[in-house]
Image (cartoon, rainbow, N blue to C red):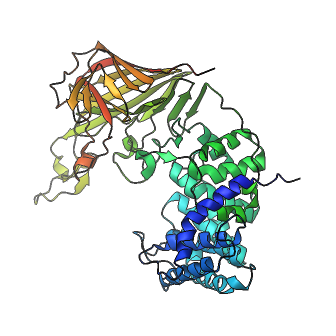
Amino acid sequence: MPTPLDHEFLRAAARAADRRAAPLAARPDEEPVGEPHRALARRVKTLLAAHRSPDSALHGSERAVAAATTHLAALRAAQTTTGLFAGGDNVQSPPDSAFTVNDVCDAHVLAAGAGPDLHDVTAALAEIAGAATDSLLTGGVHTPNHRWELCAALARLHRSFPDQRLLDRVEEWLAEGVDIDGDGQYSERSANYAGHVSNPSLLLLADVLGRADLSDAVERNLTTTLDLIRPDGTVETVHSRRQDQHRPFPLAPYLPHYRLLAVRTGRGDLARAAHLAAAGGIDDPDLLARTLLTPDLARTLPAPAAETLPRHRHLTAAGLAARASVTAHTVVYGGSDVPAHRRVRSGLACNPTFLRLFAGDAVLDAVRLSRGFFDLGPFRAAAMEQVADHRYRLTETLTAAYYQPLPKEDRRDDGDYRLVDEGRFSAAMAFPDRPRDEVTHTTRVEVDLREDGADLRIDISGPPVPWSLELTFRPGGAPEGAVPLGDGRWCLTTGPMTYRSGDDEIRVEAAVEAGGPLAGPDRGDVLRYDPGQDHTVVGGTDATTGNRVYLGGLGPHTLTVALRAHRPAPAV
């Protein structure tokens, strides 16, 4: 027998939809001026879900239908002669339009066959979908996740308006293979795009096409994500190649995927994640429509499995390791794309944070290391090696060059040489043709992940250059034992310091093994974060905010830094 419905979940999903739909239904004739096409389609879908759901206060509401009709008129007006939608920074974009068409097709399923009061709405949705079909059928993409969003739109179009050409195009895209690695991470390594695009698209394709392998890929991603859920209820993003690499991402968008696969597989660990994703309350207005379109989503979850502690996970392809215990959750990261590509670029993993530590309310959000070497930016490991069970070595060697005169055969009388990027800057000097005198600088960081934190051993070798280690603590606590510098900054030398928030604390103690003394609080020129020229040349930065503690000096140096979490014993 099928699992019974979870009526409490259904009511919560209906309330979330009503919070969005009720104000629209209260003013059904009000024109949605300035709303982008994706928002218009999502509103139509939410209004129709509320109209159809017995758990909604708008069940059977004529005003909800009227509001949907008003929004559909605005949506049709936003459609260009190509069938694609106007708006946004991606011009004439098939994938951006696919997001909207996905909602249009879902709304069509909700409206079709529901009765004469939705006849006009159904016809308007069919008109919009039909106008977009040819452009989506032949259109291209420009990010990995776009392929699956576009495929989902084509599959939804086929679901409502069967056309073999749509399935053939989906198969052409899917023949490239889903971009998921052996660790269960998509190529963009982004929680945002996994949660909002790849996972929901692949689950839809699995259902429409009968492709269990696509559902299996999502299950693998969700299984890996279990080890990336942080104690604050967010998903780790430091290794992402997209915009979320510099900000936390909530677990809530993963709720429907964890919930659906927990129901279908009976896995208690996925059920536990579904409960965590809903712990802050259900506020996604789209969930109600999803329950109507995929009834399994509304079934009662299996019993959640208890979290296993301690645990340790190493994602080799992403260069990320995490160790969690009842005392601390520590993440070490050494998978940046910047050393190989020699640039900061959209689509690359660029975050220079190489360690985080969570100890209850005391949180060390970021550990970063700046070096004053040719303005090439902070330490980003080019290699991450596991040297023992819980120990990792991160390494980066930077190289800059001084260039000799051109060989005689490459000289020009007019002095007009090629403009070339040599990896650090560009100039009309035909750099590849010149002999080079190279200067190198190597940084090695060994991280031993412990149940109560981490031990760092940092080795900075090469010519004498200033360096600064930055520890950014989450606001809400106070550093004790460090010298205040003002503006949320402190200086640490070799004395211990403690960052305390409530009853939780992180203790930091540094020691110099080789090299000169550490910089004192008067060395503001050293004790600072330098984002490097890729940011500063355009007046930008990727600096953190929060309570920042610095220690630094003039290398070469070898030093150790002990990070220890202390928390009260849990109540029995």
Q: Nearer the viewer, residue 537 or 556?
A: 537
Q: Is residue 427 left or right of residue 254?
A: left
Residue name at image x 52 percent, y 70 percent:
23
Single out the residue that lies furthest toward the right: 1
Mark yes or no: residue 469 visible: no
Q: Is residue 511 left or right of residue 6?
A: left
Residue 496 position within the rendered picture, expressed as x and y whole percent measured from the top left: 33, 16
Where, quadrant-wise, is the C terminus in this rendering?
top right
Q: Nearer the viewer, residue 277 or 168?
A: 277
Q: Hey, which quadrant is residue 91 in on the image?
A: bottom left
Q: Nearer the viewer, residue 432 or 499?
A: 499
Mark yes or no: residue 552 visible: yes
Query: Total marks drawn?
Result: 0
Residue name at image x 12 percent, y 57 percent:
415
Residue name at image x 60 percent, y 50 percent:
254
Residue 122 position within the rendered picture, expressed as x and y whole percent measured from the top left: 66, 82
Q: Hey, which quadrant is residue 525 in on the image?
A: top left
The correct choice, above or below, for 66 with respect to 154 in the image is below
The correct choice, above or below, for 175 with respect to 247 in the image is below
The correct choice, above or below, for 459 with respect to 266 in the image is above
Q: Nearer the viewer, residue 74 or 175?
A: 74
Q: Is residue 167 left or right of residue 331?
A: right
Residue 184 position within the rendered picture, expressed as x and y whole percent measured from the top left: 61, 44
Residue 183 position within the rendered picture, expressed as x and y whole percent measured from the top left: 60, 40
The correct choice, above or below, for 398 with respect to 388 in the image is below
